Image (spheres, helix red, strand yellow):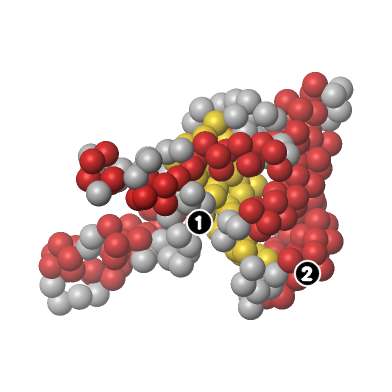
Amino acid sequence: MSPSSEETSSSLPLHVGIIMDGNGRWAKAQGKNRLEGHKKGAEVARDVVHWSKNLGIKQVSLFAFSTENWQRPKLEVRGLMSLLAILIPKTLPEMMHLNVRFRTLGDISPLPNSAKKSVKQAVEATKNNSGIDLILCLNYGGQQEILSAAKNALRHALLQDNPEQAMEELNPTTFRELMWCDDIAPLDLLIRTGGEKRISNFHLWDAAYAELYFTDVLWPDYSQEHLELALEDFKARERRYGLTSEQVQS
Ligand code: IPE
Ligand code: IPE
Ligand code: MG
């Protein structure tokens, strides 16, 4: 093995994104209602932050509620929102202890006030922490995030003397700066549990060169060993970004 590939193979992803899927199927298999699955899933979400921190990951984003999930049965949506309102404050002391910086990605304005309040308090309380960034994707949609950046770009261009030139000057880097959280690193590793092999509107722009990892494990059954397996798999990948293998090796 060449020194460079050895170096690559020991590398950890900086930013891991997780589509935490399978709560409903887990509950069904246990003869429980879907909300019981979400409750167990929320415990695992809390644990995965611990594991990630211990394993040296710097940013973890968890897909908790998509822009499309509003269309689920009212009772389920309400249950998910109360879980957020209750569990975020309950987990706050632990986040402080672990030095977690809690933030969200997505438009939280339509969330019920109780959930919004919990989110805002946790964001404020943890804003100076630096151990790991936990990015909870709430009412998040990748298409919506890109569209919002496009609207920002258009607004900016229309204010310039030469809008055409302002448009021409846009490039992937400057466009990225107009997105919701421009200080979050691109996704290195995208994990989806629950067996489906799709992205479901998660981090569309930032997953451009993410390594994808799919597992059949249902989210409530996810363990530190499963995360370690995903990291092992990531280590063995060669990220080429359009180059040839020889170029990457040298
Ligand atoms: C993921 O689990 C959690 C959310 C989308 C909120 P699901 O609720 O989608 O579980 P399945 O896919 O129905 O098993
Ligand atoms: C994606 O899971 C959203 C979250 C995990 C929050 P879904 O269960 O909503 O995705 P689809 O419907 O299977 O694509
Ligand atoms: Mg699902």
Q: Which secondary structure, mark 2?
A: helix
As drawn, the label of residue 161 is none
Taking depth in this image into account, of 214 and 12 the one nearest to the observer is: 12
Residue wearing tag 1: 14
Q: In this view, does 215 lie to the left or right of 146?
A: right
Q: Which residue is drawn at 35% across and 50% down?
A: 4
Q: How far apart are marks 2 and 1 (CA)?
A: 21 Å
Q: Residue at x 50, y 56 (%)?
A: 14
Residue at the far right in the pictured view: 31
Residue 240 in the image: above or below residue 198? below
Depth check: 113 or 200 in front? Answer: 200
Residue 97's tag is: 2
- Closest to the observer, 6 or 36: 6
Q: Which residue is drawn at 54% across and 50% down?
A: 16
The residue lying toward the viewer, choosing from 225 and 28, is: 225
Please tell me whether mark 1 sits on a helix, a strand or a loop. Answer: loop
Q: Is residue 181 left or right of residue 227?
A: left
Image height of 97 relative to 59, above or below: below
Identify the image quadrant of residue 21: top right
